[in-house]
């Protein structure tokens, strides 16, 4: 490849930080300029936020050579690019990860900061506002994948929505969750580059009409009644110590000035303003549901908005380079992150047929060779379905195209299963049972060249349970890519103490090749090293203990076992199973049966969807338990319970490294993969978990002797379900459980209010839809094993070390390599920048 000499101010020479502008003097000079010219501030009066902004701008400047060189490289020499379409990107704080990937060490940053009388980088990182543009696992996965794509030098662009308000901030008031608007943009966000000249128009509503073109061809077109403009806001995504700097392109909806002329001309000033306000609300707020489909009209509008902008952007980039449209699949590989962007199938067909005048077969060939679909959940309540009438009123042309896609597909089905009406009804994109609806998973599956699940078990269940007929028709379409997490953020940045140890004993290459961590196994019997391993963990726990005290006022003992469950609150994730375990632990202490039980700190964190009553009650329940236990003198030095409010990426970075025990206790078959489970294990926490999602693969890799397994398997759960499950009978056989439930019913954890947790008790003893009671006894047994293992600290440290050593597989670098080879057929494209700049 040809090195680019862009004659740009900061060359990409990692070998020579001074000439690359990455030394302390250059960073200081950059900060000084930005303080003065960009922010209009004088150094002596600058606040920490001002200094955060100045440092961020100075760092952003240093991304630009690589950013522009990466864009220019692709423009000059086309190469297949990954388009990752996702309604969510939960990217987390940006400053520290850009410092790391650029190669500006903490020491260099602090040298620069000291000249502004700031002693530690942490003081500056603290004030950074994180963009909460996602709910949980799915959005965070997209962010890890963008980071790994860049680090592996694969050209990629992430397409999404620039929500003005991200996931709400969570307060806890009287034990209840309170949602507060997330105004992440209020202080200015320095990491985005708006590109108003690349705006796109998107239509909604209206009608379709048929016409005959100049050549006598019969055609259709869409006459929308409403429009929005999408303005791209680009966020640079730099790879680790490479020149590749990809982009996250987030669309902000703006008013459609050119379309309000009519209203202005008749003097309807307010009417025109109304349309302006209406189109702006499109990118206003993220829907805070994780794992449920609300079927709201505005949500479908958001989806079509960002998908249409993104596809137009891809087509335009081919046009700009004079590449024929038939070449689309060789230049773009389009990944649908769940069905949220699945309207892309119909929109790409519409753009190709109605606007680029291709025939159906050519358009379908292009679409199906470009698009692939990742499924993230089997829960029926999460599968997106759009009411047909609503869908037609918003996207009438898309519905016509979907009908035609469906007609052709069902013809194939009829040939394959003649006379089998049930199969046709089941596979149809249109749900005809009850209120008619469009099934987005069926649309995505029919069009995609690959459909993948996110862990081995999940991909298997996807094939065998959710889509057996599709898998029979297209066996080669279905595949697995087990999720992964980026070791840059989740080890190097989050856990500098551990990273130093790994650098020393494995060598710094672990950070881009996590399989090297197996070298740690050589140390598994080295007493001194194991002690150092334990001491490192303890040092990180001290920091978290400080944070817990500042946030909640609860004093926790850093040498106690930190037992942690952080994730969205959901019944299938079973935080209430963990809470019941805590009550049992408490009762054993109360009843003098706690001999040999090591001191524990049980930590919870996570948000509940604002409309999910049972999840919110579970938060109240945990806080009730915490209040009772933490106030009881008998619990002093033995048991502490903490609910950390407002769990987000920034807080997660504090929590994973400080954990001893990772709670992964979902009902088998319900958690598609989990990714927190990987972050815990990499940071040396042991897992207590069910055979669900990626837990299965984590256990296989770390070894069953280094994992606390409990609970029914997916098959056993299915059997229970079909044979009739009676949770009340379980209570009768388990006195500890009965006592816990009795106390809850007496209001022991709710200041005497026996009614507060009644719905939770009724749920558990009535239907218990997630088999909490069915797994309770085995869970307690596994918790006793945990306690035993913790008592032999050398043994525990060894198990912890083996967890870190053997979880290299769960690096998102490995996941991305899987996607590149099996689904995308995309390859690295190193960007060269000459260092010989004057
Ligand atoms: C799974 N979010 C995890 C993770 O693959 C898995 C749903 C509807 C609307 C908005 N967001 C959602 C999810 O479905 C989601 O986050 N799924 C999660 O994806 C990454 O590790 O098991 O629950």
Image (cartoon, helix red, strand yellow):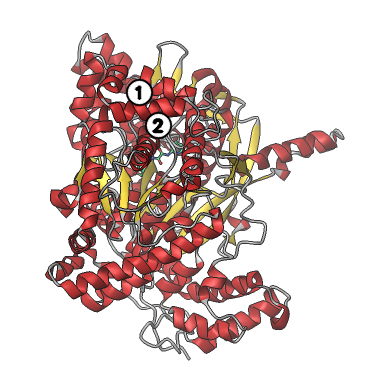
Q: Is residue 368 left or right of residue 432?
A: left
Residue named by callout 1: 769
Looking at the picture, does residue 127 appear above or below residue 686?
below
- In this view, the residue in front, 390 or 333, is 390
Asked whether the viewer can see residue 78, the reply is no
**Image coordinates for residue 247, horizontal then vertical, percent:** 46, 60
Q: Is residue 230 left or right of residue 157?
A: right
Q: What is the number of the mark on residue 362?
A: none
Circle 1: element type: loop
Instruction: Residue at 32%, 14% (x, y): give it.
Output: 425
**Which of pointers 1 and 2 lies earlier in the amino acid sequence?**
2
- In this view, the residue in front, 138 or 623, is 623
| Quadrant showing the N terminus | bottom left
**Image coordinates for residue 720, horizontal then vertical, percent:** 22, 20
Looking at the picture, does residue 667 appear above or below residue 19?
above
Asked whether the viewer can see residue 150, the reply is yes
Residue named by callout 2: 571
**Pointer 1 and pointer 2: residues touching (CB < 8 Å)?**
yes
**Image coordinates for residue 317, horizontal then vertical, percent:** 46, 55
Q: Is residue 693 left or right of residue 107?
A: left
Q: Is residue 687 left or right of residue 184?
A: left
Where's ligand 1: which quadrant?
top left
- In this view, the residue in front, 202 or 657, is 657
Which residue extends farthest right? 267
Instruction: Residue at 49%, 84% (x, y): give it.
Output: 21
**Image coordinates for residue 45, horizontal then vertical, percent:** 73, 79
């Amino acid at each position: 490849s040809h090195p680019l000499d862009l004659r740009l101010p900061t060359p990409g020479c990692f070998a020579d930080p001074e000439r690359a502008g990455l030394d302390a003097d250059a960073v200081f000079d950059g900060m000084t300029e930005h303080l003065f010219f960009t922010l209009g501030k004088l150094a002596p009066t600058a606040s920490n936020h001002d200094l955060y902004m100045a440092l961020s701008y100075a760092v952003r400047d240093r991304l630009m050579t690589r950013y522009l060189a990466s864009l220019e490289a692709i423009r000059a020499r086309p190469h297949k690019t990954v388009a990752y379409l996702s309604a969510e990107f939960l990217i987390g704080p940006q400053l520290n990860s850009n410092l790391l990937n650029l190669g500006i060490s903490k020491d260099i940053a602090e040298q620069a900061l000291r000249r502004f009388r700031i002693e530690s980088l942490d003081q500056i990182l603290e004030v950074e506002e994180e963009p909460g543009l996602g709910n949980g696992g799915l959005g965070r996965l997209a962010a890890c994948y963008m980071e790994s794509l860049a680090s592996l030098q694969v050209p990629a662009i992430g397409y999404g929505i620039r929500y003005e308000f991200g996931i709400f901030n969570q307060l806890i008031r009287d034990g209840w969750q309170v949602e507060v608007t997330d105004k992440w943009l209020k202080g200015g966000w320095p990491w985005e580059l708006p590109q108003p000249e690349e705006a796109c128009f998107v239509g909604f509503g209206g009608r379709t009409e048929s016409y005959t073109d100049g050549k006598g061809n019969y055609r259709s077109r869409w006459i929308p009644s409403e429009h929005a403009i999408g303005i791209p806001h680009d966020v640079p995504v730099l790879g680790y110590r490479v020149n590749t700097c990809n982009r996250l392109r987030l669309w902000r909806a703006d008013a459609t000035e050119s379309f309000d002329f009519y209203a202005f001309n008749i003097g309807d000033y307010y009417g025109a303003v109304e349309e302006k306000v209406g189109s702006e609300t499109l990118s206003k707020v993220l829907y805070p549901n994780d794992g449920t489909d609300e079927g709201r009209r505005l949500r479908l509008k958001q989806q079509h908005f960002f998908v249409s902008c993104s596809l137009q952007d891809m087509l335009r980039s081919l046009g700009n380079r004079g590449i024929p449209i038939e070449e689309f699949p060789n230049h773009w590989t389009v990944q649908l992150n769940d069905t949220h962007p699945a309207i892309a199938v119909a929109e790409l067909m519409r753009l190709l047929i109605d606007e680029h005048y291709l025939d159906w077969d050519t358009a379908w060939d292009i679409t199906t060779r470009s698009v692939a679909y990742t499924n993230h959940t089997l829960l029926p309540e999460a599968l997106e379905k759009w009411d047909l009438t609503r869908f037609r009123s918003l996207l009438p042309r898309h519905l016509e195209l979907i009908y035609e896609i469906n007609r052709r597909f069902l013809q194939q089905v009829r040939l394959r299963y003649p006379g089998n009406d049930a199969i046709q009804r089941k596979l149809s994109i249109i749900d005809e049972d009850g209120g008619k609806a469009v099934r987005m998973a069926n649309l995505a599956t029919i069009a995609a060249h690959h459909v993948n699940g996110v862990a081995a078990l999940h991909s298997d269940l996807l094939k065998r349970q959710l889509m057996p007929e599709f898998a029979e028709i297209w066996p080669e379409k279905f595949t697995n890519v087990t999720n992964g997490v980026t070791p840059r953020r989740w080890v190097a940045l989050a856990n500098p103490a551990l990273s130093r140890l790994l650098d020393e004993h494995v060598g710094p290459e672990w950070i881009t090749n996590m399989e090297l961590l197996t070298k740690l196994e050589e140390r598994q019997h080295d007493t001194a090293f194991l002690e150092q391993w334990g001491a490192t963990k303890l040092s990180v726990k001290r920091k978290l203990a400080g944070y817990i005290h500042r946030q909640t006022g609860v004093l926790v003992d850093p040498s106690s076992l930190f037992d942690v469950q952080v994730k969205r609150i959901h019944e299938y994730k079973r935080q209430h199973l963990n809470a019941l375990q805590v009550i049992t632990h408490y009762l054993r202490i109360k009843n003098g049966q706690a001999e040999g039980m090591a001191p524990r700190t049980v930590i919870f964190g996570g948000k509940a969807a604002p409309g999910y009553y049972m999840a919110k009650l579970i938060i109240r329940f945990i806080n009730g338990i915490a209040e009772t236990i933490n106030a009881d003198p008998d619990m002093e030095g033995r048991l502490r319970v903490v609910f950390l409010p407002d769990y987000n990426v920034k807080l997660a970075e504090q929590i994973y490294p400080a954990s001893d025990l990772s709670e992964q206790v979902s009902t088998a078959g319900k958690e598609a993969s989990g990714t927190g489970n990987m972050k815990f294990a990499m940071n040396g926490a042991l897992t207590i978990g069910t055979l669900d999602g990626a837990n299965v693969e984590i256990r296989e890799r770390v070894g069953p002797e280094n994992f606390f397994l409990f609970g029914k398997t997916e098959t056993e759960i299915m059997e229970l379900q079909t044979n009739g499950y009676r949770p009340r009978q379980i209570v009768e056989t388990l006195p500890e459980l009965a006592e816990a439930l009795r106390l809850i019913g007496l209001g022991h954890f709710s200041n005497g209010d026996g009614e507060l947790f009644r719905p939770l008790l009724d749920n558990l003893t009535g239907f218990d839809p997630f088999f909490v009671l069915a797994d309770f006894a085995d869970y307690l047994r596994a918790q006793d094993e945990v306690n035993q293992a913790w008592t032999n600290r050398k043994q525990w440290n060894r198990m912890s070390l083996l967890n870190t050593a053997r979880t290299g597989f769960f690096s998102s670098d490995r996941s991305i390599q899987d996607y590149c080879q099996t689904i995308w057929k995309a390859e690295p494209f190193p960007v060269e920048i000459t260092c010989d700049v004057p």
